[in-house]
Image (cartoon, rainbow, N blue to C red):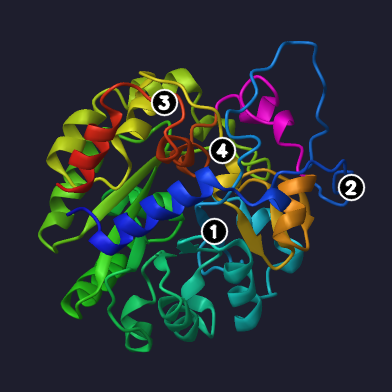
Amino acid sequence: MRFPLSMTAGMAGYIARNKFRPKPEWQKTVLSQPDAANPFHIVYTHTDAPRQPHPMINKRFPLVLMLEPLHTCNLTCTGCGRIREYESTITQKLSLQQCLNAVDECGTPIVSICGGEPMLYPEIGPLAAKLIERNKTIYLCTNGMFIVKRLKEFKPADKFFFNVHLDGMEKNHDIAVEREGVFREAIEGVKAAKQAGFRVCTNTTVYKETDMNELEEMFEYLAQFDVDGHTISPAYGYSAVNDREIFMTRDDIHEKFKDIDRLAAKFPLFSTPTYLEFLQGKRDYPCTAWGNPTYNVKGWKGPCYLITDGHYQTFEELMTKTQWENYGAGNDPRCDHCMVHCGFEPSAALGINAKLGDTFKLMTWAFR
């Protein structure tokens, strides 16, 4: 199986329950003012163009929590917006209890611990242990450089993954993260984690200059270490990263991912086949940004992992004060070329714009 059976069954049950009976307190819409202190806020301009309402707009619920205990990082990756957007709070961190409260508040079955570099978080071991006690699936997103040093703070579990960021083979990955030697240290971390019995996957961001043949080479290289799977997603231009040259338009993405089916047949990609079809331009999805909410030192980040128009003190405020109908391709220019997984994998998982045969396709993928 691509994932543990308990994880697959748990997510399926969670989605079914919330589709049938979503929490009514999350479905309200409350008018609010944008965060004027946010230096990257872009004022939304209303248009008279007709809008297609999101099919889940009145049945909103989260699927994966993006938990950022801190934004401190030992690297300055070219495409990362966090170290720039949160420069004023870069030394701050959440307490362990704040992290757990956020997990309990939104109730997602999956928690992606990211940052910054979460392995710099002093209580990362206890945090992982507490989430395992809560029966959560955990993806600890890391550059891999501290796995060897801190591995003893963790215990292997079916629902715990080290998710190591790799954007290519050694030369190009080290260019992307702006430091030599990072690839080799990450590989040592992968090897150590696998030898200790942990599940390990990788996370790859595809930029305009990414060579897909090199990614195939990388996946082949990682196979020798029995890596459990790979997540792949196109890069997206954060408001905090003013470098349009490295990012892609939707047409660029369609061209870049045109042969992704061949890689998906050859390697254990964690990205769903329906999401990959979206990247190829074979189907369309609305963005379901509330499906992957983000919590960090400033609160609940809205509207999404990539755009910050405000921070909210409670999850209910995020769900009700964010003007969701103002976002998405055609509604906000910042969204026009976004196809990133945290906005559109939830749409695929929820079966929005489903086609005949999707259920069989997803079941075949999950049980491969």
Instruction: Tell me which secondary structure the magenta stretch mostly adopts.
Output: loop
Q: Which residue is mark 3?
A: 253
Q: Residues within 10 Å of mark 2 (few under 14, many from 20)?
A: few
Decide: marks 1, 2 in contact (CB < 8 A)? no
Question: In whole angstroms, how far apart are the C-alphas of marks 3 and 4?
Answer: 19 Å
Instruction: Give amino acid for label 1.
Output: Met
Does 156 sit left or right of 317 as displayed?
Answer: left
Bin the neighbour count of mark 3 within 10 Å (Cα to Cα): few under 14, some 14-19, many 20 and up: many
Amino acid residing under circle 3:
Ile
Q: Earlier in the sequence, mark 3 or mark 4?
A: 3
- Residue behind mark 4: 288
Q: Nearer the viewer, mark 4 or mark 1?
A: 4
Q: For this view, does 197 lie left or right of residue 77?
A: left
Q: Quadrant of residue 262?
A: top left
- Disc 4 residue crowd, few under 14, some 14–19, many 20+, Cα 10 Å: many
The quadrant of the image that shows the N terminus is: bottom left
Residue ID for mark 1 = 66
Span colored in magenta: 322-337
Left or right: where does residue 49 sit relative to residue 367?
Answer: right
The answer to which of marks 1 and 3 sits earlier in the sequence is 1
- Please name whichever residue, 30 or 41, is drawn nearer the observer in this view of the structure: 30
Residue 216 in percent (x, y) is at 19, 40
Q: Does 308 sit left or right of 44 as displayed? A: left
- Of residues 188 and 92, the one nearer the viewer is 92
**Which residue ends up furthest to the front in the rendered image?**
20
Give the Cα separation between the discs numbered 1 and 2: 24 Å
Q: Is residue 61 above or below residue 360?
A: below
Q: Amino acid at mark 2?
A: Ala
From the top left corner, tell me how far across and down residue 226 is, in percent: 14, 62
